[in-house]
Amino acid sequence: ARYISHKKLALTLGIKASKYDWLVFTETNCLPASNQWLRLMARNFTPQTQIVLGYSGYNRTKDWLHKRVAFDTLFQSLRYLGFALAGKPYMGIGRNMAYRKELFFKQKGYSKYLNLQRGEDDLFVNQMGNSSNTRVETDFHASMRIQPVYRYKDWKEEKVSYVATSRFYNGTQRYLLGFETCSRLLLYVACIAGFVSGILSFHWLAAGTALLLWLIRYTVQAVIINRTAKEMGGNRKYYFSLPVFDILQPMQSLHFKLCRLLRGKGEFMRK
């Protein structure tokens, strides 16, 4: 196994050895939120369904790094699970997902991206998921709780690895998400510039308009994120920290992309 991804090899052997059609996946740093996890995931196993996506998130802690990671995970889940609920699945996370064994062999396993270190979850769903064969389980009791992250280096490596595979995604979703990230930064720049220039020039209408625009977006965003976090079992509220994470998240994304570009291609190949 010197020149094959050990994770893909282990998954392939496990899938081939399985006796039944439905395969449910998680990872070693996860625990089910309840003993109803498998039952709730299994209720989506209809004749038309081939892929089931579930939620995985972090419990609340006081560590700053963990808060960053928890928000980033929640925001990422809003994106890929939201697209899947809208009938446009583009990726999945191996912490909580299921698919049919026959789908794995139809795809010829991980042969199309065997040269990559990762891709066993997101690229698999990206290539095989569609509006008719993918369902999402949103019940909190079917979610996975991830162990806290204690080292920034570990989280960074995980994010950079996903960046390395995201460029192979099919569909327009990644372009739409990139547009959302850019437009978010532009909105902040425009609101701050309008507010500051309005105050300095005593143009109170311009300053008030910029502030009102930001408050409308903040209110809508806070309602959506906090409601989703509550329904997914999170006990953290995002109010004062939301603007900080909202600005920090796209900058983190840009940083991880730059890290991938500055590294050699061989670092993301199978090993």
Image (cartoon, rainbow, N blue to C red):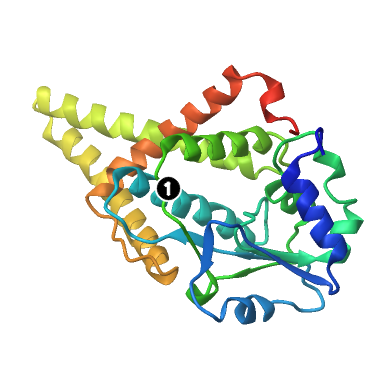
Regarding residue 132, the answer to whether it shows in the image is: no
Q: Is residue 46 left or right of residue 72?
A: right
Element class at badge 1: loop
**Residue shown at 80% from the left, 48% from the top:** 9
The picture places residue 75, in percent across and down from the top left corner, at 46, 51
Q: Is residue 186 left or right of residue 17?
A: left
The picture places residue 67, in percent across and down from the top left corner, at 34, 49
Q: Is residue 169 left or right of residue 67?
A: right
The picture places residue 240, in percent across and down from the top left corner, at 22, 50
Please identify the quarter of the rendering in which residue 117 is found: top right
Regarding residue 269, the answer to whether it shows in the image is: yes
- Judging by the rendered image, the residue that carries numbered circle 1 is 149
**Residue shown at 52% from the left, 66% from the top:** 31
Judge by depth and name the residue closer to the eye, 265 or 30: 30
Type of amino acid at the residue the image marks with label 1: Val
Q: Residues within 10 Å of mark 1 (few under 14, many from 20)?
A: some
Judge by depth and name the residue closer to the eye, 268 or 50: 268
